[in-house]
Image: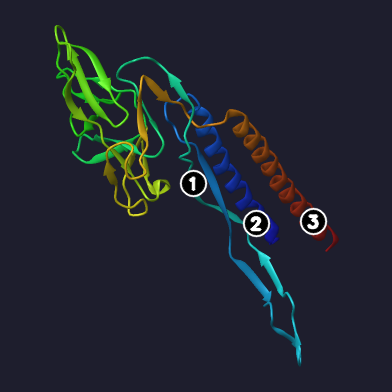
Amino acid sequence: MNSALWVSKTGLSAMDKQLNVVANNLANVSTTAFKKDRAVFEDLMYKTVRAPGGLSAQNAELPSGLQLGTGVKVGATQKDFSDGDYNVTDRQLDVAIQGKGFLQVQQPDGTIAYTRNGSLQLNSEGQLVTASGLLVQPGIDIDQGAIDIIISQDGIVSVRTQGDADAQEVGTINLAGFINPTGLSSLGQNVFAETNASGPPIVGAPGTDSLGTIAQGMLEASNVNSIEELVNMITTQRAYEMNSKVIASADGMMSFAIQQL
């Protein structure tokens, strides 16, 4: 069996995964605070016919050897946590994190997850929640009579009620940072979970411990560059076609050999 068939098969499989990554990036080009992925490729093991540095004769050392590759695989997908553009919404409960850090939210099972989607809302009890209903941690309750909600750059949340000249502080939004944010596990709904690879969260007030600051009345856009992803899609398609042609060529060589025997 021609080994080029199997090598090209791995190439087709890798390009299929790459196209899936590109498609997901493009699908989320309008998702608030979405962070794009990129596929990380690795070559597979090698068949060593002659090892580099081996002896070809007495006192004669091979300078390079003969090693035949067996293909490629997608070894990982890596999140790009660079900031997206910031869009002004002028909505009091919209917040954008300018710099590093994540909002902390409580999942239905009680565990803490992390998000950069600052499109916050109030639930029926006046608690600050995400668009999917996850409670912001630490919990913040907003009085029903509040007419103004002020969120400072360092995360202090204050409200002003009817008849009050001064705003009253009701809580603080803390941020969590990670030494390796690409190690976070994506749970969907713009939410991430801590893993051993990400390390434990470093929780602090915005603007401290290398954490970013909070901008009220703004939202962070997706960091997907649609033009870049379209170029990646074309490159992936061409690579897929080339691997297909290698299979066709290997098949033609085998067919010719069989006909001549």
Badge 2 or badge 3: first in the primary sequence: 2
Q: CA distance from mark 2 to mark 3?
A: 15 Å
Say which residue appears at 29% left-offset and 32% top-offset. Answer: 154
Task: Tell me the quadrant of the picture where the C terminus can be found.
Answer: bottom right
Which disc number belongs to residue 253? 3
Badge 1 or badge 2: first in the primary sequence: 2
In front: mark 2 or mark 3? Answer: 2
Say which residue appears at 45% left-offset and 40% top-offset. Answer: 81
Q: CA distance from mark 1 to mark 2?
A: 21 Å
Disc 1 marks a residue whose amino acid type is: Thr
Q: Position of residue 20 (x, y in %)?
A: 53, 38
Q: Position of residue 29 (x, y in %)?
A: 50, 27
Instruction: List the residue tagged with mark 2.
Output: 7
Badge 1 or badge 3: first in the primary sequence: 1
Q: Residue furthest right?
A: 260
In the picture provided, is 182 more to the left or to the right than 228? left
Q: Secondary structure at mark 1?
A: strand
CB-based contact (under 8 Å), mark 2 and mark 3: no
Q: CA distance from mark 1 to mark 3?
A: 36 Å
In the picture provided, is 51 more to the left or to the right than 186? right
Task: Tell me the quadrant of the picture where the N terminus can be found.
Answer: bottom right
Q: Against 158, is 97 above or below? A: below
Q: Secondary structure at mark 2?
A: helix
Q: Is residue 137 something that shows in the picture?
A: yes
Instruction: List the residue tagged with mark 1.
Output: 77
Badge 2 density bin: few <14, some 14–19, many ≥20, Cα 10 Å: some
Q: How many marks?
A: 3
Which disc number belongs to residue 160? none
